[in-house]
Image (tube, helix red, strand yellow):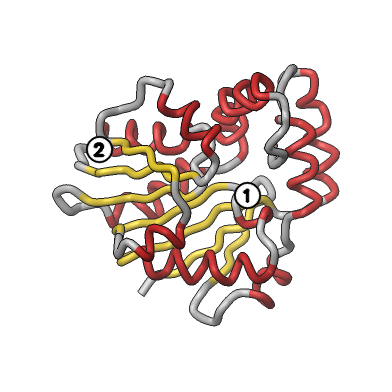
Amino acid sequence: MDDPMCDLQMLRNTYAQFGYVNGAFAGWRRIYKRWIRPLLSGAPSRLLDIGCGGGDLVERIATWTSRDGLKVDITAADPDSRAVDYLNGRSLPRNITVLQTTSADLVAEGRTYDVVISNHVIHHLSSQELQRFLSDSRKLATNLALHNDIRRDDLAYLGFIPTQLLFRRSFITVDGLTSIRRSYLPGELRRVIPDSWRVQSMPLFRNLLYWNP
């Protein structure tokens, strides 16, 4: 997926299938209820998803907040033009704005959001990139910056192999297995993040990296 020359149709299939994987494993419903919903009481509040990919997460949050009677302006940001083109071709809720941009660009523009989140971004970053990303997300967030990612585990790796039977003509399985190998253990994350950040282990092999005032 990170290869700019990868098969475009397989990439689009991957974007379309992300929702099934995130829905099954990422635990965002629990995170939304515990961490995010209590902070979205403004009228309206602002939420940013950095590295939004196929946009399934912002769609879920738009649905949940609507059901909860919350008014939230949601920004789905990704630096990859292929993700942005895919999102612009979809019928998204009206309160979602799609931007092709980086966290650094948003900081430079002076933007701020009540809540800043990401899903499956951390393991893609080098140590220096991670430091910049955390610095940016803290500057962008007024109430909470929260990054949900995979926790490396042999059982998770073995358990993900059978997904190749379900997700064909996409990068879901190969990308997922690569991501598991590249992801952090909680102790490894704690050694490289600033003191103001915290790491919490979550069910189904997840790391939750967060900052709040």
| Residue 208 position by quadrant | bottom right
| Residue 202 position by quadrant | bottom right
Where does the image place residue 10, in percent across and percent down from the top left? 68, 22
User: In the drawing, does residue 62 fall left or right of residue 206?
Assistant: left
- Specify the label residue 68 is tagged with: 2
Give the residue type that dot 1 points to: Pro
| Residue 141 position by quadrant | bottom left
Q: CA distance from mark 1 to mark 2?
A: 25 Å
Residue at the farthest bottom position: 195
- Specify the label residue 203 is tagged with: 1
Q: Is residue 4 above or below residue 189?
A: above
Mark 1 is surrounded, within 10 Å at the Cα level, by few (under 14), some (14 to 19) or many (20 or more) other residues, namely few
Q: Secondary structure at mark 1?
A: loop
For the point 30% across and 58% down, the residue is 113
Give the residue type that dot 2 points to: Asp
Q: Is residue 107 above or below residue 167?
A: below
> Is residue 157 or residue 109 the one in the foreground?
109
Residue at the farthest left position: 43
For the point 69% across and 50% down, the residue is 205
Where does the image place residue 30, in percent across and percent down from the top left? 47, 46
User: In the drawing, does residue 37 fall left or right of residue 18?
Assistant: left
Where does the image place residue 53, in percent across and percent down from the top left? 53, 38
Q: Earlier in the sequence, mark 1 or mark 2?
A: 2
User: In the drawing, does residue 142 fall left or right of residue 86?
Assistant: left
Where does the image place residue 67, in percent across and percent down from the top left? 26, 32
Mark 2 is surrounded, within 10 Å at the Cα level, by few (under 14), some (14 to 19) or many (20 or more) other residues, namely few
Q: Secondary structure at mark 2?
A: loop
User: In the drawing, does residue 161 fall left or right of residue 208?
Assistant: right
For the C terminus, which image quadrant?
A: bottom left
For the point 38% across and 47% down, the residue is 33
